[in-house]
Image: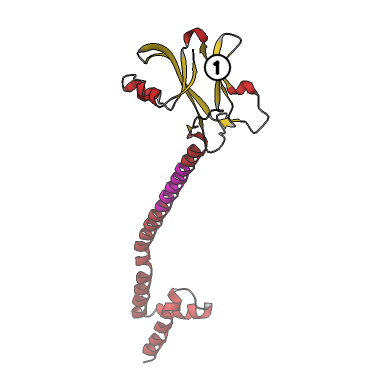
Amino acid sequence: MMKEINCHIIQDILPLYVDEVVSDDTREMVEEHLKHCEECKKEVAFMKRELYLPVEKEVPMIKNLKRKWRNKKLMVSGLSVLLTGLILFGANYLVFHHDTLIPYSDSLVQIELQDDGRLASHYYGEGYYSVHVAGPLTVEIDGKEKRAVFLHYTKTISSSPTKKLFNGKDSRNEQDFIFSLASLDDIDVVYYADFDSMEIFDQGNNWEPVIEHAELLWEK
């Protein structure tokens, strides 16, 4: 009967013994009892198996979940960086490199004869991003063939860090605003017009629609 009582007492503290949270004296008492009690030995073995086997199965699963979560975080981070880069690139292009036509006005540009016998476009506006020039080209105007030059100036939302935007608000050097065109002998007429040279070339090099909406700057 004492053995049975002792077993009940021992079995009450076996979970603590298996978890190794008992005092040294208690541990010695349990181990001494286990030397002579097969039933309690089996109970200890069962507890240890129950404690450790599921952990061995669970660890790889947890590692898998952690790896998948880490990979997902890396993917999301990568996509965020890519998206941010695309947005910044788009904004940079829109602000600094997307140029639009500067509308013509009477005081915007004049065609002047230079000392070297060449015609030049002199820009008098406040600032511009670039000048687009096509010609001299042989075109038919009022039934006659003439050598024509087409040009226009463009602007961006802001000054560009990679391409020079001439700014008339600062102390300006007029030479920066003079663009040489061609020899006087090679030009009959100069127009200010909105055009896309590549598009016109692809459509048969027909400049008549451009001339219809162009502003005459100079004529021989």
Residue at 57% x, 33% y is 161
The percent coordinates of residue 39 (x first, y second) are: 33, 80
The quarter of the displayed image where residue 195 is located: top left
The percent coordinates of residue 71 (x first, y second) are: 40, 51
* Relative vertical location of residue 49 with respect to residue 184 in this rendering, above or below: below
The percent coordinates of residue 116 (x first, y second) are: 59, 8
In front of the other: 11 or 153: 153
User: What's under tag 1, amino acid-wise?
Assistant: Ala
For mark 1, what is the residue? 120
* 32 relative position to 107: left or right: left
Neighbour class for label 1 at 10 Å: few (<14), some, many (≥20)? some
Q: Residue furthest bottom?
A: 1
Q: Quadrant of the N terminus?
A: bottom left
Asked whether 207 falls inside the magenta stretch, the response is: no
Magenta stretch in the rendered image: 71-87
* Relative vertical location of residue 78 with respect to residue 204 in this rendering, above or below: below
The answer, for residue 135, to whether it is visible in the render is no
* Relative vertical location of residue 78 with respect to residue 52 in this rendering, above or below: above
Residue at 50% x, 78% y is 22
In front of the other: 94 or 213: 213
* 74 relative position to 117: left or right: left
The percent coordinates of residue 216 (x first, y second) are: 47, 22
In front of the other: 19 or 204: 204
The quarter of the displayed image where residue 193 is located: top left
